[in-house]
Amino acid sequence: MRGALQCRGVSIYAVSAVVIWSTTAALVKSLLTAIPTYEALFVSSLAGCLFLIIMQLVRGGGRVFRAYDVCGYAAMAGLGFLGIFLYSGLYYYGLSQLTSQEACILNYLWPMMIVLFSALLLGEKVTVRTAAALLLSFSGVVVLTLGGEGHAEGDALLGTAACVTAALCYGLFCVLNKRQNMDQTVMMVMAWGVTALCSLPVTLIMEEWTELSWTQWGGLLWLGIFIDAVGYLWWAMALQRAKNSAAVANLAYFVPLLSLVVSAVTLGEELSSAALLALVLIMGGILLQNMRRHER
């Protein structure tokens, strides 16, 4: 009975995170039509950072924050700059140039980036199936780049490059973060804090600060607190408590599928044939790689 309840709890955390994350592309796309990119990133990141700090203080006190020295926090700051600030800034730029569906599909190259960097940095073996999976996923990028002309709202080439580079940054972040083996609550507090700190001078220097409406405040707080802070936390809790982490991780593959539905309903975007084929290729590469893991 207890095991069944624990399994149900894991499923609730994981499914809730997936549902929350599926709103990211459409929400950010909508916000960026009226709010400068780095202003949106600053406000949402600051909200997420403060929420995580308050939650940790309420839940278990501040002892976990005293467990690391200056070098430890410097490492976290560097990882946060790479995996959250650069990733988010590039992904948001891609969203401003492409449709939310196209950007979301390209964003889900990051699982394959994890495979690539695990081989390069952690010495994991690259098999023929792994190489085929990488080739399959990257072929999706080619299809979307060459076949998506006329569907993108801005510079399709730059938008695609930004989304692919964002996925590269996040994949590298995941591998380096795994190697460091740090407390993830502290790590995410530092990551979102560094993102807010880096976004502020960028938006003040390069952008014209926009006065936010109540609706925009609500959207940014949803982005920062629920998508950034709660979503990542619930996902980490699901993976931590799961007996089979791979089974939970498979649920992440539903995010781009649900995102397409959310974007179609809220933004009225139609899924192009190129975007659909790219989604099939990228997800196919990820699933092919995941099948390799289950056969071990």
Image: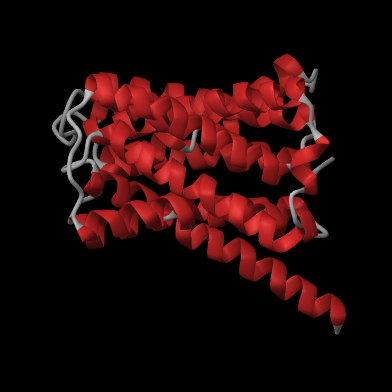
Q: Check the image and tell me how it is coloured.
A: secondary structure
Above or below: residue 6 compared with residue 126 = below
Residue 249 locus on image (x, y percent): 66, 51
Tell me what residue is drawn at x 67 percent, y 55 percent.
56
Tell how many labels.
0
For this orientation, the residue located farthest to the bottom is 1
Name which residue lies at 67% across and 37% down.
187
Q: Quadrant of residue 142?
A: top left
On screen, residue 241 versus residue 136, left or right, reads: right
Along the line of sight, the residue nearer the viewer: 167 or 269? 167
**Which residue is found at the position 72% from the left and 24% from the top?**
118
Image coordinates for residue 276, horizontal then vertical, percent: 33, 44
Q: Is residue 93 left or right of residue 154?
A: right
Q: Nearer the viewer, residue 276 or 208?
A: 208
Does 256 sit above or below residue 214? above
Q: Position of residue 55 (x, y in %)?
A: 62, 58
State the image quarter where residue 141 is shown: top left
Residue sitting farthest toward the top: 120
Quadrant the C terminus occupies: top right
Q: Is residue 132 visible?
A: no
Residue 280 placement, left or right of 49: left
Whether residue 11 is visible here, answered yes or no, is yes
> Which residue: 38% across, 32% down?
91
**Residue 24 at what x, y percent from top left?**
38, 50
Q: Residue 54 vs residue 240: left or right?
A: left
46 and 276: which one is in front?
Answer: 46
Quadrant holding the N terminus? bottom right
